[in-house]
Amino acid sequence: MAKKILTAGEPMGLFIAREEAPLEAVETFAASVAGAEFNVAVGLSRLGHRAGYLTKLGQDPFGRRILRVMAENGIDTSLTTRTEERPTGFMLKSRTSRGDPDIYYYRKGSAASTLCPKDLAGLDLGQWDALHLTGILPALSPSCFEASLTLIKKARQLGVPVFFDPNLRPQLWPGQEVMVRQLNRLAALADYVLPGVREGQILCGSADPEEIGRFYLDKGVRAVFVKTGAKGARVCTRQGSFGVKAYPPRRIVDTVGAGDGFAVGVISGLLEGLDPAKAAQRGCAIGTMQIMNAGDNEGLPTRAGLEKFMAENRQA
């Protein structure tokens, strides 16, 4: 049975370099749409679930493109509003065959950065089966942090499970101490937290998956899915912890979006009744499928594509 998952954040216009070169030297770009929460919404929709996106867009070409792409992917835009006062953010991304691409953001003062608790006044979270947030929206502005906090508190009051991916963006915060304090405050209110080991080093003071898991379990989180890169993931629950192996990629085209793919697998898996191990296994599979494609979300599979990949590929 299809589930309804609400996410909130900032979708952006994306220009991907067509050739490998420093961004300032790139001659041609391909236009697309990006954003961590957007990627998750796309992935969940392709698996047959109903994803909604709470955000603000400008009355500009980027905003119109994002609305069109969301509609094409079956994403519910009833909670997406438009404004003429602020622009839609966009970003540039380099093309690289090794390591992570260079990314440059143009999002300061964007429409999404004006989200605030007043925008949630008429929101009925009770009609949603889950809420997914990342650490990006609360980093955009103080009002966005308050909106994020309000969303999580509303979900907790209604018993709606909350998934939280820290997705660190240090450049958006006034300082690391503020970032760590505020993101851990939000994470402690979530049911499921999905950090990476490098994020754990910053947020928890350790890159040890077990210690990261204990850190959040001690704060009241139900389960922690720690992304361990090429090794896969470590799942930590009150009943114990265990590792889930990765699916080795046939090739690595673009590492951006791997964590969002993992989130798609974990969220969809748990909501469909899979146990944490199977949900993490699905997350590892989708994460690998994503990094074998150039765009931020082009590798996110349909249900048939996911089943085919998992049947034909083995974990490391």
Image (cartoon, helix red, strand yellow):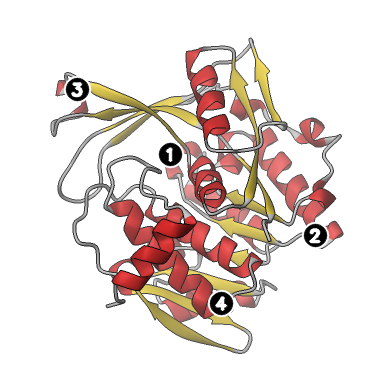
Circle 4 crowding by C-alpha within 10 Å: few under 14, some 14–19, many from 20:
many
Query: Label 1's element?
Result: helix
Q: Quadrant of the N terminus?
A: bottom right
Q: Give whichever of discs 4 and 3 has the lower sequence position.
A: 3
Where is residue 234? Give x, y as percent: 44, 77
Distance of mark 4 from mark 3, alpha carbons? 44 Å
Viewer-nearest residue: 314 or 236: 314
The three-letter code of the residue at mark 3 reads Glu
In the rendered structure, find residue 97 and report the number of the disc placed on it: none
* Residue occupied by mark 4: 276
Residue shown at the point (25%, 23%) measured from the top left = 29
The three-letter code of the residue at mark 4 reads Pro
Distance of mark 2 from mark 3, alpha carbons? 46 Å
Distance of mark 2 from mark 4, alpha carbons? 21 Å
Residue shown at the point (86%, 35%) measured from the top left = 122
* Residue occupied by mark 1: 171
- Indicate whether 140 appears above or below 135: above
